[in-house]
Amino acid sequence: MASQFSKDFFSATIFWKTLLALGLFLYLILVPFLNTQNPSLSLIKWASPSSQPSIISPQTPNQSQPHILRANGLRKNMATQERIPGIMTDETQVRAYAPDGPRDPGTFPGGTRGHEMDRDGRRRLDFFVDNIVDVLAEYDHTKYYYLGWHSESVISNYWFSFNQAFGGGGIVLSYPLAKALVRDMDGCLIRYAQSSSADLITMTCIADIGVNLTPHKGIHQVDLHGDFSGYLSAHPKVPLMTFHHFDAMDPIFPNMDRFESTRHLMKAADADQSRLLQQTICYHRQTNWSFSVAWGYSAQIYENIYPRSYLQMPIETFGPWAKGPKPPFYMFNTRPRSDNPCEAPHFFFLESVYKSVKGDEIITSYIRARPRGLPPCASSGNHSADSISRIRFFSPAKKRLQIDRCECCDILRVDNVKAEVKFRECKIDEIIA
Ligand SMILES: *[C@@H]1O[C@H](CO)[C@@H](O)[C@H](O)[C@H]1NC(C)=O
Ligand SMILES: *[C@@H]1O[C@H](CO)[C@@H](O)[C@H](O)[C@H]1NC(C)=O
Ligand SMILES: *[C@@H]1O[C@H](CO)[C@@H](O)[C@H](O)[C@H]1NC(C)=O
């Protein structure tokens, strides 16, 4: 065990130094090796145990390069994870942390987002480093913090715990907490030797230290199936930090495979991570249309005026990962899909992202996914949006850090085929309805 610890510790230390040099907080290792002089918050990912420890693994498949940490710190008695049908458990033993960006096999490139691959080269986790750094900067690193988020499926939280962070999306521990957890690791594993889940035992050990979960809705386990567009188009108003299981879902863009879809979204992430998926809503009163955009991903036109309180509920285009006998299935409210012309939106998806000539604005353009195939909404004046094929949104080319309130927008123009919308801060008394 001792040599395994020191090997992993060694690899972790190299990794950490590289990251520190780049000013990143992101650190993906296992708790037991966290006794470094690390002053910051750490993103901890648990992995299933495996018999063979390894450091930098050369046997990764043909994927471009790699920081591979085999994280196998959990003890043997965790090896017998019982599987509950329908629940994703961590099975991957080799993880490659493959940042996007320039390909330099020796360093963690200065990219602002990355992804984690499994042994077969499938992406398991996408993370948004700029946003993670900004979110973590809000917390005092000398205090005890356990950050994470639930499963989106109610029943999974019931089966495991409503108090736990789900490890797929990532668990963040502050240094003092990680240190305390390491100190009590043996004792805790003995106290809860019967525990069947790594995420659950993490929570129980942390609870015994006196700390509880600080939920953060930007960390996504993504325990959902099918078409994720409804959820992504009404993302909670917090910076996006991680996505897990992204590739268990349908591709998020029409006419693209999963890989292309992820790359397409990442173009927007590279342009402005702070606004990525943030929902902004405004109205074209002349036609009684509501515009909603999930920045960098999709836009909708409703042929009716709907308040933000309604539009922020995702349309249920997806299904739960694990389904209980009856609703509620999700940890959030949803709207059903509808064929009512007043309720069903026209759907547009990201086409391109570019900077204005002056460089002060970012323009995201969204094109119609498909004809809506419904008559116009009669009760709001019969103004059909069928002819609109493209919407362009202009947003400031600077990061937005305010998290107390969403942005607002104005419709600049609407003609027969396109609409243009400009972002701005909401006015003091502005009501989005
Ligand atoms: C990786 O290698 C495997 C087998 O060698 C092959 O089937 C697969 O297509 C390769 N993947 C990529 C992305 O090149
Ligand atoms: C907007 O809808 C309301 C009913 O909701 C209707 O009274 C009004 O005339 C409509 N306005 C236009 C410009 O169609
Ligand atoms: C609404 O528009 C449709 C054609 O799109 C038309 O057939 C219908 O009569 C219109 N209804 C009203 C109330 O104007």
Image (tube, grey):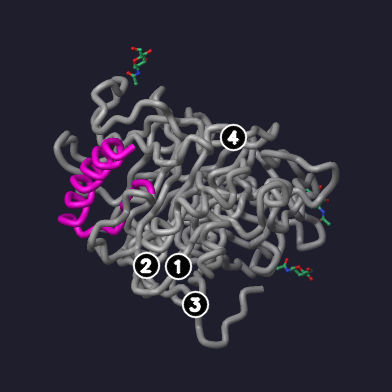
Q: Main secondary structure of the magenta part?
A: helix
User: Mark 2 is on which residue type?
Assistant: Pro
State the residue at coordinates (80%, 56%): 378
Mark 1: secondary structure: loop
Q: CA distance from mark 1 to mark 2?
A: 8 Å
- Image-quadrant location for residue 115: top left
Q: Nearer the viewer, mark 4 or mark 3?
A: 4
| Rendered location of residue 336, percent (x, y) | 77, 49
Amino acid under label 1?
Answer: Tyr
Badge 1: residue crowd in 10 Å (few <14, some 14–19, many ≥20) = many
C-beta proximity under 8 Å, tags 4 and 2: no
Separation of residues labelled 4 and 2 (CA atoms): 28 Å
In space, the residues marked 4 and 3 are separated at their CA atoms by: 41 Å
Residue under numbered circle 3: 404
| Residue 34, quarter of picture | bottom left
Q: Residue at x 59, y 60 (%)?
A: 291
Report how far apart the C-alphas of labels 3 and 1 lie in the structure.
21 Å
Amino acid type of disc 4? Gln
Give the distance between the C-alpha atoms of the residues marked 1 and 4, in whole angstroms: 26 Å
Crowd rating for badge 3 (residues with CA inside 10 Å; few <14, some 14–19, many 20+) = few
Pointer 4: what residue? Answer: 81
Please give the label number shown on residue 145.
1
* Marking on residue 176: 2
Q: Amino acid at mark 3?
A: Asp
Instruction: Look at the image and give the residue range highlighted in magenta.
Output: 1-30
Left or right for 227, reference 40: right
